[in-house]
Image (cartoon, rainbow, N blue to C red):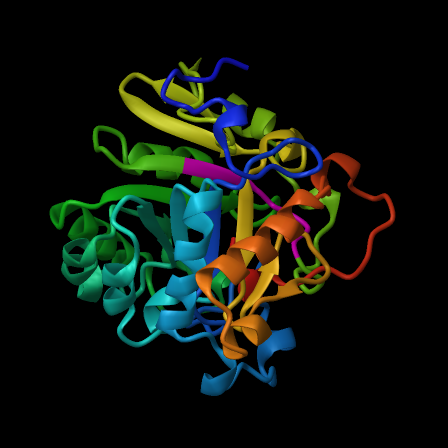
């Protein structure tokens, strides 16, 4: 795989794992709460009576920022804010403004509140936003998201983000029997705009989304629904999407099931309650909150993370079906 010259050589990173993968990208779950109940992430029947985290259980913005600052010397270059739904967390813009200015700061959101906050997010230092949008027709959108919200609300949020100067990607999870038609419809909707579309295979994240491989529409199957696709090189090492151009439109396919990308995965995840996870499909995390609340310095956190990451050997998607244990829910650690 060709890597662009802008990507740093592996040897320049300050920490690598057991498979020689650097720590470059940090996903931070700001909350475990969400205002949708997407069937593939947070199905209502499992979360109606769920005990969500209390305020004191969640890391403060100051604690989260200390973790981020601790990881910069280890090679961190990107931070993505996730949830749950990150825009449900109060004063999120104040946290964005705290973060080190040399980092690329992004957010993943369902877009329901994006129109309200887009300008504030841009002004606080956010550079990019990824918006989940699984369908353009109200019936499918509401069925997949188990919500009374409408796709028009999300589309207004996307336009507000663009007008505020944020770079926008759209994530569309494709699930057989639900929204195959969205492959072509979503591409057509954003044709001629600067919005990048990413299609995602239905993944077996967590234990509650009723995953089975018969409901997976693979990237190859999706590409057959589209025309005139030209493959292009990744933007950087560890990019998870297989990128294509259709004219001037960029489309990408995240193919964790059919084309695992574990070999280049450089992401760590921090849950809202302060545990570090080294894989989206992990069964348990590493407690950083206790260290923080015992007065740990940046140097202490940095060394703790160095120790955790250097032992990392995760490759779930490459070894799917082998020695499986109960997985953490995606709504808890973000996508």
Instruction: Tell me residue 70's x, y (percent).
Output: 45, 55
Describe residue 69's horizontal placement relative to residue 95 as left or right. Answer: right
Q: Quadrant of residue 249?
A: top left
Vertical order, 262 against 220 (above or below): below
Number of marks in picture? 0
- Given residues 245 and 15, the one toward you in this image is 15
Instruction: Tell me residue 236's x, y (percent).
Output: 43, 26
Instruction: Tell me residue 324's x, y (percent).
Output: 83, 52
Instruction: Tell me residue 202's x, y (percent).
Output: 61, 46
Describe residue 283's horizontal placement relative to residue 117 as left or right. Answer: right
- The reply to whether residue 134 is visible in this rendering is no
Q: Quadrant of the N terminus?
A: top right
- Given residues 174 and 281, the one toward you in this image is 281
Q: Which residue ends up furthest to the right in the rendered image?
A: 323
- Residue at (60, 82) in percent of width and height: 50
- Residue at (29, 52) in percent of width and height: 100
The boundaries of the magenta stretch are 198-205
- Given residues 127 and 232, the one toward you in this image is 127
- The reply to whether residue 291 is visible in this rendering is yes
Q: Quadrant of residue 193?
A: top left
Vertical order, 269 against 49 (above or below): above
Describe residue 48's horizontal placement relative to residue 160 as left or right. Answer: right
Q: Quadrant of residue 266?
A: top right
Residue 42 is a magenta residue: no
- Residue at (53, 81) in percent of width and height: 53
Residue 203 is a magenta residue: yes
Describe residue 209's horizontal placement relative to residue 65 as left or right. Answer: right
Vertical order, 236 against 179 (above or below): above
């Amino acid at each position: 795989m060709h890597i662009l010259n802008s990507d740093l050589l592996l040897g320049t990173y300050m920490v690598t794992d057991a498979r020689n993968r650097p720590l470059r990208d940090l996903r931070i779950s700001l909350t475990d709460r969400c205002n949708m109940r997407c069937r593939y992430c947070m199905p209502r029947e499992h979360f109606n009576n769920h005990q969500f985290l209390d305020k004191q259980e969640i890391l403060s913005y100051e604690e989260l920022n200390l973790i981020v600052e601790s990881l910069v010397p280890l090679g961190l270059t990107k931070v993505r804010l996730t949830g749950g739904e990150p825009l449900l967390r109060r004063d999120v813009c104040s946290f964005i403004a705290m973060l080190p200015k040399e980092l690329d700061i992004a957010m993943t959101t369902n877009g329901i509140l994006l129109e309200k906050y887009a300008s504030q997010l841009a002004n606080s230092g956010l550079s990019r936003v990824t918006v989940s949008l699984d369908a353009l027709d109200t019936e499918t959108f509401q069925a997949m998201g188990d919500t009374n919200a409408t796709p028009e609300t999300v589309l207004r949020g996307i336009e507000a983000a663009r007008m505020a100067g944020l770079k926008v990607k759209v994530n569309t999870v494709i699930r057989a029997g639900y929204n195959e038609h969205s492959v072509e419809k979503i591409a057509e909707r954003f044709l001629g705009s600067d919005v990048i579309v990413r299609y995602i295979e239905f993944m077996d994240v967590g234990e509650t989304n009723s995953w089975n491989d018969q409901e997976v529409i693979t990237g190859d199957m999706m590409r057959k629904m589209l025309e005139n696709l030209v493959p292009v090189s990744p933007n950087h090492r560890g990019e998870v999407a297989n990128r294509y151009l259709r004219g001037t439109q960029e489309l990408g396919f995240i193919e964790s099931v059919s084309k695992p990308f574990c070999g280049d995965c450089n992401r760590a995840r921090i849950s809202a309650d302060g545990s570090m996870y080294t894989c989206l499909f992990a069964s348990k995390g590493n407690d950083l909150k206790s260290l923080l609340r015992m007065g740990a310095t940046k140097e202490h956190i940095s060394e703790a993370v160095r120790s955790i990451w250097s032992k990392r050997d995760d490759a779930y998607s490459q070894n799917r079906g082998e020695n499986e244990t109960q997985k953490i829910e995606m709504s808890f650690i973000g996508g």
